[in-house]
């Protein structure tokens, strides 16, 4: 059970989540359940996808993560992963220290992030990029869609060093 009005409806509309809908906030809230429920159903079904997040739900200080924004972010990640599945099946135990070192060596190349995405796909791991929603404070997450590992990065700090740090951090969760 969700309070559909608590989802980041304006931000979702601006990102095109509602297929051409252009409402003001009042009308979005009025139609929230009919707009959001169909987005959740294919991914969440009866349970939500499990995710390992770098940011806790309640961070130090006054920042509290918006759980509704986090949920819709995860739904968008899983949908993207399903649309672009990896080229191979994932083999549990394949992500080792040596494997991570081989991946990290790709950082020396100009197209390192693209090469990393191809490397992961060849090993059955889907790498997805999805901008964070306001009040999620995420850099990345590792999650499973069934047996399919997904690594999602927000590129909130759009720097090459942050890409590699967040990617390797999330892959340790996959390992």
Image: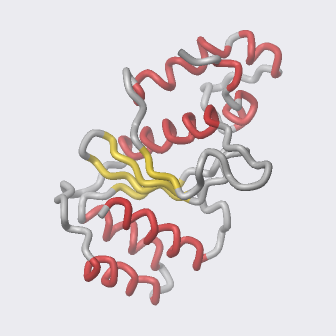
Q: Quadrant of residue 33?
A: top right
User: Relative to 90, is 77 on the left or the right?
Assistant: right
Q: Can you tell which quarter of the image residue 79 is in?
A: top left
Question: Residue 13, position in %: x, y?
Answer: 69, 30
Answer with left or right where residue 129 lies relative to residue 31: left
**Rendering colour mode:** secondary structure
Name the spot of residue 66 as percent of width and height, x first: 67, 38
Q: Is residue 46 above or below residue 59?
A: above
Up/down of 101 relative to 60, above or below: below
**Left or right: 42, with 7 as reference point:** left
Task: Name the spot of residue 81 as percent of width and height, x first.
Answer: 39, 46
Q: Residue at x 32, y 65 (%)?
A: 120
Residue 102, position in %: x, y? Answer: 31, 83
Asked if one can make out residue 29 in the rendered structure from this viewpoint, the answer is yes
Query: How many marks do you count on the picture?
Result: 0
Which residue reaches farthest bottom?
108
| Quarter occupied by the C terminus | bottom left
Camera-side residue of 168 and 119 = 168
Q: Residue lying furthest front in this view?
A: 60
Q: What residue appears at the point 29 percent right and 55 percent down from the top-left corner?
A: 86
Residue at point 67%, 43% (across, down) = 65
Q: Is residue 25 left or right of residue 149?
A: right
Q: Residue at x 46, y 89 (%)?
A: 108
Could one spot residue 128 in this view of the protein?
no
Residue 83 placement: quadrant: top left
Q: Nearer the viewer, residue 126 or 5?
A: 5
Of residues 33 and 85, the one drawn nearer to the viewer in this rendering: 33
Tell me if residue 137 comes above or below residue 103 in the rendering.
above
């Amino acid at each position: 059970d969700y309070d559909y009005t608590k989802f980041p409806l304006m931000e979702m509309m601006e990102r095109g989540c509602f297929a051409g809908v252009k409402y003001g906030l009042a009308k979005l809230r009025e139609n929230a359940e009919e707009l959001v429920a169909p987005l959740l159903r294919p991914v969440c079904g009866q349970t939500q996808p499990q995710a390992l997040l770098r940011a806790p739900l309640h961070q130090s200080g006054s920042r509290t993560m918006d759980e509704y924004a986090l949920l819709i972010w995860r739904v968008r990640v899983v949908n993207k992963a399903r649309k672009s599945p990896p080229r191979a099946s994932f083999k549990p135990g394949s992500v080792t220290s040596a494997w991570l070192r081989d991946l990290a060596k790709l950082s020396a190349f100009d197209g390192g992030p693209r090469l990393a995405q191809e490397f992961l796909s060849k090993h059955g791991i889907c790498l997805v990029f999805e901008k964070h929603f306001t009040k999620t404070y995420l850099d990345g997450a590792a999650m499973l869609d069934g047996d399919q590992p997904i690594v999602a990065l927000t590129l909130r700090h759009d720097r090459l060093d942050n890409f590699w740090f967040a990617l390797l951090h999330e892959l340790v969760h996959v390992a």
